[in-house]
Amino acid sequence: MATTRSELPDAAGRFGDFGGRFVPETLMAALDELTTAYVAARDDDGFQAELAALLKSFVGRPTPLYHAARLTAHAGGAQIYLKREDLAHTGAHKINNALGQALLAQRMGKRRIVAETGAGMHGVAAATACAMLGMDCVVYMGEEDMRRQEPNVHRIRMLGAEIRPVTAGARTLKEAVSETIRDWVTNVADTHYIIGSVVGPHPYPMMVRDFQTVIGREARAQMLEATGSLPEYAVACVGGGSNSLGLFVPFVDDASVRLIGVEAGGDGIETGRHAASIGGGRVGVLHGSMSYVIQTDDGQILDTHSISAGLDYPGVGPEHAWLKELGRTEYVSVNDPEAVAAFKLVSTLEGIIPALESAHAIAYVVDTLAPSLPREQAVLVCLSGRGDKDMGTIREADEAAGAR
C-alpha cells in the first residue's frame, strides 16, 4: 500500500473517495497559498531543523514509552505500553501540530492566528505557540465546552489569547469550528487558521497528520529498543483523529501491526447519543471535507454526545475513512461509563491521570483486547493527554451516579 507523503493525498487532496475541498470560493486562494507554503516548508531543511529544535527544547520530545506493568497484570494477557503524550508541554499531543502550523504561519507573514477547541487542549497549544512566537491568537470555544473544561479556559487567557464563546447549536466543537471558519474567511489576508485535527479542506488533513507522525515515529523506535520487535497492536482514541493517525501512519506498512481506533460511544450507538462517526455515521461533507459524518438521511448534521469534549465531534478525518475502507484500520467504540472506569483505573494503578479522550482507548485495551491475547504480545496505546482538565467532569459523573 502506498503511504508516502507525496502520494497521499493526491493533488486534489483526496484519499481515495475522501477528503478534497468543499469550501466557499473565497477560501480557495488561501488554501492554494497554504498548500504551496506547506509543501515548500516540508521540504526545507531549515524549517524542519527549527521545528525539531523546538520540539526538543520547548515541547520536551521525545515523550517516553512506558510499560504499564500494573495495568497489564490487572488486564491479564498482552503487555500494555503507553506512549506518554501527556508529558509533552501543555499536557497533550496538540502542541506538535500547533507549533508546526504557527511556525508555518510566521513563515507566510501571517501575524494573527485563529483556532477552535473542544476539550481546550488545542486552544491551549495554539495560545502557547503564539505566546512563544509573539503572535496574536483568538480561540473559539463552545459555551458547553467552556463549562466542562473551565481550567483550560483560564489557561488560554493566561497565555494572552482571546477566547470567544460560541452560543449556537449544541455549543460544542462543531459550532466552534464553524465560527472559526467564518473568522478566517473574513480576515484571510493576515490570519491563519490552525485546525486542531486531521479534518477540514486540503491541505489540513495532510499537514496535521505530518506534524503528528512524530508520535508514531518515536514510538516505533522506542518499541524496537524496549522489546526488540514491533507491537502486535497500536491503539488510539479517535475524534477528528490526529493523535491516532500520528500513531498509526508510521506503522501502516507493517502488516504485522494491527491498527485500532476507538471512537466515543457516548450513551451507546443504538441510542443515537454518541460521537462515533465511523461506527454510527455515513459518508458526507462536513467543514470542507468528505468523510464519515453523523447526519440525517437528508444530510443534516446531527448533534453528538460524549463525556469527552475532545471526542464530541460529528466527523472524522478523511484519511481514517480511507484506511477503514481499505481494511487497514479497525474502529470500535467505548461508552461513557467504560471510559470513566478506565480513567479511574489508570489513575489508581499507574499514578497517571489520563485525559478522558485517552481513557476510551485504554478502556478497550484493558476490558477487551489485552485479555484476549497471549502474554508475549504487546499493545501500544497512545495516551494522548493528561486528565487535569477532566476532574470536574468526573466529579459530575460521580454525583450523577450517586443520585441514581
Image (cartoon, rainbow, N blue to C red):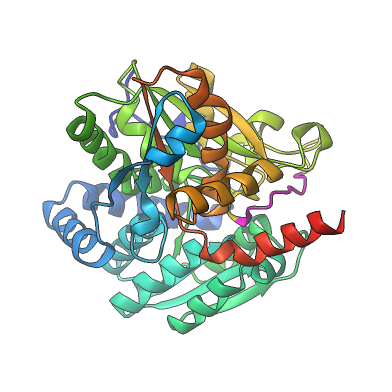
**Predominant secondary structure in magenta?**
loop
Q: Is residue 79 magenta?
A: no
Pinpoint residue 58: horizontal percent, then vertical percent: 24, 67
Which quarter of the image is occupied by the N terminus? top left
Task: Between residue 154 and residue 141, name the one nearer to us.
Answer: 154
Q: Residue farthest to the right?
A: 404
Residue 310, can we see it?
yes
Residue in the image at 48% along x and 48% along y: 349
**Is 27 left, or right, of 7 in this rendering?**
right
Side of 323 relative to 43 (left or right): right
- The answer to whether residue 307 is magenta is yes
In the image shown, does 17 or 93 lie closer to the viewer?
93
Identify whether 246 is placed above or below 14.
below
Q: Up-down: is 233 above or below 164?
A: above
- Frontmost residue, 196 versus 283: 196
- The span picked out in magenta is 301-309
| Residue lying at 64% horizontally and 36% vertically, measured from the top left | 334
Percent x, y of residue 254: 30, 20
Residue at the (28%, 45%) spot, across then down: 214
Q: Is residue 276 left or right of residue 66?
A: right
Q: Residue 218: where, in percent of width, then height?
A: 25, 42
- In the rendering, at what x and y percent does residue 89 appear? 34, 65
Q: Residue at x 55, y 63 (%)?
A: 116
